[in-house]
Image: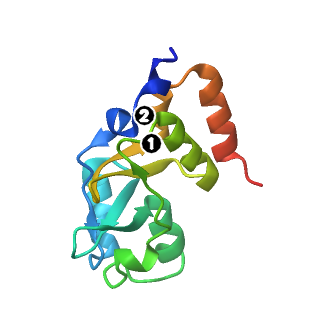
Amino acid sequence: MTTEGVNKTAGQVMHEGAQCVGEHESLRTAAEMMRDMNVGALPICGDDDRLKGIITDRDIVIKCVAEGKDLDQTTASELARGLVWVDAGASVEEALAKMEEHQIKRMPVIDNHRIVGMISEADLAKELPDSKLAEFVHRVYARG
């Protein structure tokens, strides 16, 4: 690995074209989207096409299925987690810092008030020197 990735922006290392689940869509729809796209998290967008939060496969299992809630009646917005995102022009270091601070492994990337992609730990792993990657993994997976 090189140190080149540290000089890149979030927009340069993200997965482009993140597909949102609508805030009024059911968790079954969200789960089917995750299955079909082979992803573990989806951004939640409102009727105004703006980011409202993020939902993970783990959220669906723990906060819906395990609680006995109905997958068809529970909406994505009911389980939306905090609104943490990074600007497409932010540095990889800035994205890394936000992910560490919030102990998250995936984060939406915003450009001009619209979601343009998602950045994950795998995206960062390709760009960071081994020492930075090890530090990130330790901080994100550490439970204080």
Residue 61 badge: none
Q: Residue at x 53, y 80 (%)?
A: 67
In the rendered image, the quadrant that contains the C terminus is: bottom right
Q: How did the renderer colour the structure?
A: rainbow
Mark 2 surroundings within 10 Å by alpha-carbon count, few (fewer than 14), some (14 through 19), many (20 or more):
some
Q: Given the image, on which type of amino acid does mark 1 rest?
A: Ser
Q: Residue at x 44, y 55 (%)?
A: 85
**Dot 2 corresponds to which residue?**
123
Q: CA distance from mark 2 to mark 1?
A: 5 Å
Residue 97, how many percent across, how many down? 58, 44
Where is residue 29, by image quadrant? bottom left
| Mark 1 element type | strand
Q: Is residue 133 left or right of residue 48?
A: right
Q: Residue at x 25, y 52 (%)?
A: 36
Q: Is residue 132 left or right of residue 30?
A: right
- Is the C-beta separation of discs 2 and 1 under 8 Å? yes
Where is residue 54, by image quadrant? bottom left
113 or 77: nearer the viewer: 113
Q: Residue furthest right?
A: 144
Residue 107, how many percent across, how many down? 44, 51
Is residue 127 in view from this perspective? no
| Mark 2 element type | helix
Residue 26, how many percent across, how many down? 30, 76
143 or 34: nearer the viewer: 143
Q: Given the image, on which type of amino acid does mark 2 rest?
A: Asp
Residue 101, how many percent across, how many down? 63, 51
Is residue 82 in view from this perspective? yes
Q: Is residue 95 above or below residue 12?
A: below
Residue 120 badge: 1
